Image: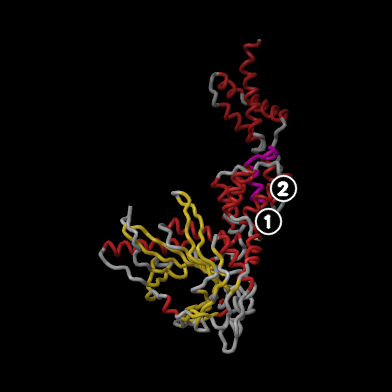
Amino acid sequence: MSNYQAVIGLEVHAALQTRSKMFCGCPIVDATLAEPNTSVCEICTGMPGTLPMINARAVEYAIRVALALHCTIAEASVFARKNYFYPDLPKGFQISQYELPLAQHGSLAINTPQGQKEVRIRRTHLEEDTGKLTHSGGHSLVDYNRSGVPLLEIVSEPDMNSVDEVKAYATKLRSLLRYLKVNSGDMEKGIMRFEANVSVRPRGSDLLGTRTEIKNLNSFRSLTHGVAYEIERQSRLLDEGKAVKQETLGWDDVRGETYSQRSKEEECDYRYFPEPDLPPLILDQTYISQIKSSLPELPDAKQLRFTHDYRLSPYIASVLTAEREVADYFESTIAAIPSLSPVTISNWLSGEFFALLHHSGQAIEETRIEPTAFARLVALVSNDTISTSSGKVILSEMFETGKNPEKIVADRELAQISEPSEIDRLISHILESNPSQVSQYLDGKITIQDWFFGQVMRATQGRANPTAVRSCLEKQLKEIKDKPSSE
């Protein structure tokens, strides 16, 4: 065990899925696909004489998140100018919230190996995004399409003490944002970015160590690797009797290490002051209540319901409720054929179906298999029309082609043989064709029964019902064994 305990807080910047930017009417475009600087105007590029206007939909989305995080919503919040001069900030300042944020004092429950843990939320506030810099050949290119996109910043307290807790928090928060349909969670496109504040202290101490901030981590991999590296680096410095410098760090994914960007700014460095062109944001309690009543069932509540109503294990329930689309697909499958066992459906969905999705890189909402067709496939296996192995083959073909399961069964002649008279006839033929093996059985070699079973399954190309085959085989072998004593 290390001599040090990590203390970690996260700042999460989530782009809100509105149609237009935070303070102007420019449409939101995919910054990875759109031509650079095609969704810009006088307001988001800070031309003189222009006035911003608050995006009402962005405010609604921010309130949805704050309520889901159990935050206290401020009836009055204030936008401020955060001054710093970067090429990707054409105005020379960012409109954000500082002293009076939209919401404060929330929490998010995460699951850890030691049990459930509450991570406190310090604040959530609205701001605008910056542009995007691309460095190439000694030059820097700037694209302002992203400048002015509404961002929700969610700041946790330093309540996390391990990389596992950091990943659990980030994963849970991403799931929550996707449930609320305010953010796609597509981190490769910069839609969601993390900044980790990391410090270490002697184990058992209540004092906080000197912290560093790792900026712009845009994947779970870079987040966890960056935090792990920084914990190890700071611990090593302290072991060597050296001081940790308070600074802002970048993360080099290729080299697998952090690097210094600048000394850590404090609030005074940004020279915050109230945005003179925007009035305070006043929220009516009736409006907040309306938004609260429109919230969907959230992951924790859905997980509890799945364990109670469908008798799923807590683990499987957590897997199926991690993404809203998966949970909806599961319940749509149940609704298609209510007589099916939810546990059986969950096993097929979390097993074979998930494997196909993972291999293809598809999300479940992109699949060609409709829930009704998936339900019919599970029913075909459950009622012994097809075998489990045939079901896996059929599911794979459904995934590739979108065909219904009944057609695939008919086209490939995969219907299971379950008729007792047909199975009895097949077994009789196998026994009559193999007298030597029958003699071995009669001489006490009981394991030869498995060989007979294999011969029947091979003769039917796996289509015979295994349970029926074993039952009929045991019956015929018993009759042969008992025959001499009855003569």
Q: Is residue 240 left or right of residue 153?
A: left
Q: Is the residue under label 1 in contact with that under label 2 (CB below 8 Å)?
A: no
Closer to the camera in the image, 386 or 276: 276
Residue 280 sits in which quadrant?
bottom right
Looking at the image, is 284 positioned above or below residue 179? below
Looking at the image, is 58 positioned above or below residue 431? below
Q: What secondary structure is the stretch in magenta mostly built from?
A: helix
Instruction: Name the secondary structure under disc 2.
Output: helix
Closer to the camera in the image, 12 or 31: 12
Residue 375 percent location from the top left of the image:
69, 47
Alpha-carbon span between mark 2 and mark 1: 16 Å
- Residue 75 in magenta? no
Q: Which callout, 2 or 1, points to the residue nearer the camera?
A: 2
Residue bearing the label numbered 1: 368
Q: Which residues are magenta?
A: 382-397
Q: Residues within 10 Å of mark 2 (few under 14, many from 20)?
A: some
Residue 309 percent location from the top left of the image:
63, 44
Residue 373 percent location from the top left of the image:
71, 49
Residue 487 sits in which quadrant?
top right
Q: Given the image, on which type of amino acid does mark 2 rest? A: Ala
What numbered label is drawn on residue 336?
2
Residue 377 percent location from the top left of the image:
69, 45
